[in-house]
Amino acid sequence: MKLTKTRLYRGLILAAGLALGSAATGAFAETYPDKPISAAVAYGPGGATDFQARIATIPAEGVLGQPIVIINRPGAGGRVGWNWAVERGTKDGYTLVVYNLPHMIAQWTQDPSLSYNADNIVPLANWGADPAVLIVPKTSPFQSISDVVEFARNNPGKLTVSGAGLYTGHHIAALQFEQAADVDINFLPAEQGGVQALQFVIGGQVNAGFNNLSDAWRNRDSIRILGVAANERVEEFLPSVPTFKEAGLEIDDTSTNLRGIAVVKGVPEKVQDFLAERLPEVFNNPKVLSKLSDSGSPSLVLDREETEALFKARTQKIKSLLKDLGS
């Protein structure tokens, strides 16, 4: 093929553009961050994910050089916020994603049409592990897990249970409860998240609810906590509350709400490395750990390698569970 002047010029312009683009990306990564960083929380203000994200990122400015500003995008059990974070296409490292497991994994497993998936969410660091708990109104006649099971067995489909949306940790705990207790319940998803689901319980609009330990613990004067979906008791916060296994129900910790920070695929590697190296230091700050503990929030700080391994392990576990549950 004859190389015309036009083709030659176009080739030179393209090559120059690619070179400039590469140089610009490199220069950008070297100066990152030079402005505040946003972090998208897919649940409403005041809920466990929101208040924990605000606590966990307090030291960010001192470690990263810029503060992390929380942006709330609630709705549809997290789908609204996570779809927004991916669809807006921001790949400059200035919009982080606050993830929740098992929510994310269960949702993209069940609905491949979602914008977020295992291929475009890149986990960087984890700060907490918040088990699901079974709660009832303070005035409820239910005093134990066995009381709830007995009612559900004697009244098929009439036990109303709230939680933070479909295929959140709360919903998964409810599905496990149905299977383990061999009952049918009426699960009512709260589209605005855990706080709304908790208010349904406090207000007596439902018989019971599955919620985060941290939200329940902060509202323990208004509710009764009957059981925890964990492999062992949470001695730090709920030493007298039994696990479901203690009550004879085979329910493990798959529903535990694991929280941390990720980015959307396409963020420059140097920016990912910068964040991944420093976020564990942010989360491990004594002030953060103290404030999380004071709010009933169990900490689990993991680095990038550990967080990636966590995602892989949870993905296998959740897919297996959903298959067993027939979901």
Image (tube, grey):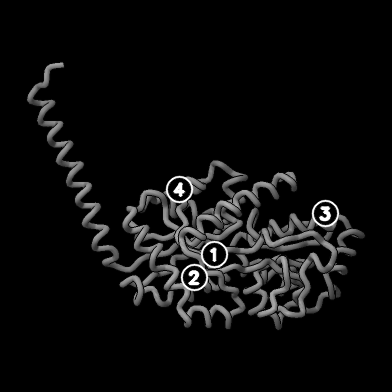
Residue drawn at (68%, 66%) of the image: 132
Measured as percent of width and height from the top left, residue 324 is found at 74, 46
User: Which numbered disc flags the more N-terminal residue, 1 or 3?
Assistant: 3
What's under tag 4, amino acid-wise?
Answer: Asn
Discs 1/3, front? 1
Q: Which residue is mark 2?
A: 53
User: Which numbered disc flags the more N-terminal residue, 2 or 4?
Assistant: 2
Task: In the rendered structure, find residue 259 and report the number of the disc placed on it.
Answer: 1
Residue occupying the far right of the picture: 154
| Residue 111 left/right relative to 37 | right
Q: Which residue is mark 3?
A: 184
What's under tag 1, amino acid-wise?
Answer: Arg
Discs 2/1, front? 1
Residue occupying the far top of the picture: 1
In space, the residues marked 2 and 1 are separated at their CA atoms by: 8 Å
Q: Secondary structure at mark 4?
A: loop
In space, the residues marked 1 and 4 are separated at their CA atoms by: 17 Å
User: Which numbered disc flags the more N-terminal residue, 1 or 4?
Assistant: 4
User: Which numbered disc flags the more N-terminal residue, 4 or 3?
Assistant: 4
Disc 3: CA contacts within 10 A as few (<14), some (14-19) or many (>=20):
some
Discs 4/3, front? 4
The reply to whether dot 2 and dot 1 touch (C-beta < 8 Å) is yes
